[in-house]
Amino acid sequence: MQSISFQNKGGGKGEITIYSEIGDSFWSDSYSAKQFAEDLKKLGDVTSLDIRINSPGGSVFDGFAFYNLLKQHKAEKTVYIDGMAASIASVISMVGDKIIMAEASHMMIHDPYGGCMGTSADMRKTAELLDTLKGTIAGVYASRTGRPMDVFTEAMASETWYTAQEALNAGLCTEISKNQAVAACFDPQKFGFKNMP
């Protein structure tokens, strides 16, 4: 079930809830970057934006578009990680001026992965693309935290799950809040995650 919603709360305040997979999905309804851009525009002229996340991730390219669209938005942005910000959802969360994780929430970063059919040359091109994407993702974490990229490329290679405190220590969030009620749940194992806590 799709669960990405936009709400103009009046007084210049808006809220986006991302309780879903990002982009095209084999397992549930899709929510593309094109739709995200349209809904963000319809939100109107807001000066503060709360972005609530509970997502296992999804399409890297759609996720980059979500991130860039939000990054370019003039509103002051507060990201709340209510349950899980995994994979590309963790990249989207880096857009926050403040990133607030619930006590029992988790953030996961890992190497991007994908499939390829074709010749050995096609497979080498896919591997090169994945390496490029890895550098882009690690660069987002490094830019947000001020830490070296290799800190994150190593953590990504190990598929690292951060508790809220660990994410705070790593600079991936700015504060920890009391637990929030989460209105959607996922089975992260179906996405091939290896080290889920």
Image (tube, grey):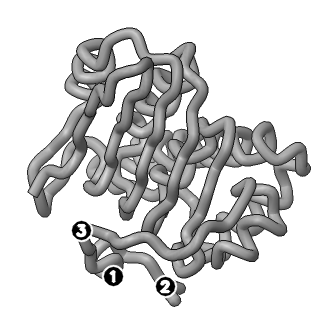
Which residue is the site of mark 2?
Answer: 196
Which residue is the site of mark 3?
Answer: 184
Which residue is the site of mark 1?
Answer: 189
Q: Amino acid at mark 1?
A: Gln
Q: Amino acid at mark 2?
A: Met
Circle 3 or circle 2, nearest the eye: 3
Side of 76 where 196 appears, left or right: left
The answer to whether the residue labelled 1 contacts the one labelled 2, judged by CB atoms less than 8 Å apart, is yes
Can residue 116 be seen in the rendering of this structure?
Answer: no
Asked where in the image residue 166 lies, by quadrant, the reply is bottom right
For marks 3 and 2, the one nearer the N-term is 3
Can residue 189 be seen in the rendering of this structure?
Answer: yes
Q: Position of residue 154 (x, y in %)?
A: 77, 66
In the displayed structure, would residue 115 be above or below residue 131?
below
Local crowd size for mark 3, using a 10 Å CA cut-off: few (<14), some (14–19), many (≥20): few
Q: Secondary structure at mark 1?
A: helix
In the displayed structure, would residue 48 be above or below residue 29?
above
Q: Position of residue 50 (x, y in %)?
A: 47, 39
Asked where in the image residue 77 lies, by quadrant, the reply is top right
